Image: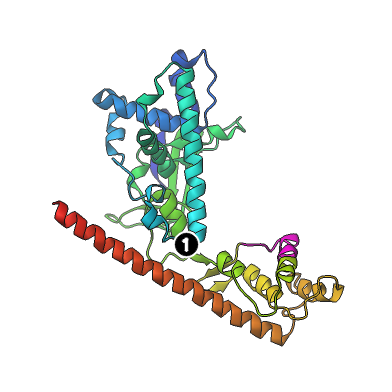
Amino acid sequence: AGEVIISVPKKFLITYKSLINLLRGRLSRHPIKLSAHQFIALYLILEYKKGSQSNICPYINMLPKDFDNMPLNYGKEIFDLLPHNVKVDIESQRAKFEHDFAAIKNFLKSHDVQSNRITRKDYLWGWLCVNTRCIYLETKNSDDVKDHIAIAPLLDFLNHTYEAKIKGEFNYVTQCYEVTTFTPYKKGNQVFINYGAHDNFFILMEYGFVIPNNPYNYVLLDKEYFDLSLPGETEIIRQEKLDLLFHYGFYGDYSLRISEISFRLLAALRLRVMQQFDVSTTETILKWKNTIMGLAEIINSQNERLMYFYLQLICENALLKAEKALEAMEALVRKFQIHAYFSL
């Protein structure tokens, strides 16, 4: 423990600045208006196309040949079975990729390079290589975010576990990016790094794998909450309650973890199940506001019983949807297995 397990010299780090210096002769006439992610992805593709002539050929050869297992590449059949919040995140990631690909095509045209030499599939490969492997690299004398990510060859050999205690940073004395472990290992045991405190959906979307029994997993119940239908709650009253949640910073992000119900979810449900709700009366709002300010634990016992009743209801609804999605996913797996068998 406390030892440096990986040390990558600065000259081997692939950064925005190192690529600018490398390509300065060819690009000096044109300003580089690309993000680090866009630029490094382009560089990896260009090196890949050089084959054995690439200066970083050994590293290129160890990169994945494709990223078919990444959610960004999921087809409609699988995508439609994902939880609502995960689909929203994937759509956001897809939009970012399309934006970056458009920027690359414009960049290539401005440098008199035929943009059709790099296809969408090519760029998706390079973009995901960066997305799954980049590190945060804080640099001195630079506030520009484009200087803050890098590719560090060799780190690919280390796998992730949430239990690993590590520190990764650039050492200005040794001029190397160093990973220090604070977890003791015996000789012959595998050494791990830690990508951060992330749930499985985040890890799947960003890195393409999941971890059994991940303690950071959670279920987001926003859709179930907003779809909730309460007896006697008119659309006007419902909207007034949602406006209050927004005003006090409690709109959305309603999570449920293995050992914890988020306070945001409890607070939002207490408001939704309030009976004799009148937004025009200070007393009505004050009773709920006291619970979110820590001045009262509950509004009243009846409200608390109703709150837990509807909490159970939305959990049951979420569980039912998850079970149906899993059944459909298993059917897809069987379908693909049969297809693969007859394709052999």
Q: Is residue 122 magenta?
A: no
Give the total of numbered labels: 1
Please, is residue 98 above or below residue 162 in the view? above
Three-letter residue code for mark 1:
Pro
Q: Between residue 236 and residue 331, name the one nearer to us.
A: 236
Please, is residue 295 above or below residue 61 in the view? below
| Residue located at (68% from left, 72% from top) | 267
Give the class, few, some or many, for how many residues have Cα within 10 Å of label 1's Cα (few <14, many ≥20).
some
Q: Position of residue 236 (x, y in %)?
A: 74, 68
Q: Between residue 341 and residue 216, name the one nearer to us.
A: 341
Please, is residue 113 above or below residue 77 in the view? above
| Residue located at (37% from left, 65% from top) | 212
| Residue located at (47% from left, 62% from top) | 83
Please, is residue 229 above or below residue 124 in the view? below
**Label 1: which residue?**
83
Q: Is residue 2 visible?
A: no
Q: Position of residue 288 (x, y in %)?
A: 76, 74
Q: Between residue 125 and residue 145, name the one nearer to us.
A: 125
Q: Which residues are magenta?
A: 242-252
Q: Position of residue 23 (x, y in %)?
A: 44, 19
Q: Position of residue 235 (x, y in %)?
A: 70, 69
Q: Is residue 245 visible?
A: yes
On the picture, is 334 further left or further right than 307? left
| Residue located at (58% from left, 32% from top) | 140
Q: Quadrant of the N terminus?
A: bottom left
On the picture, is 19 further left or further right than 224? left
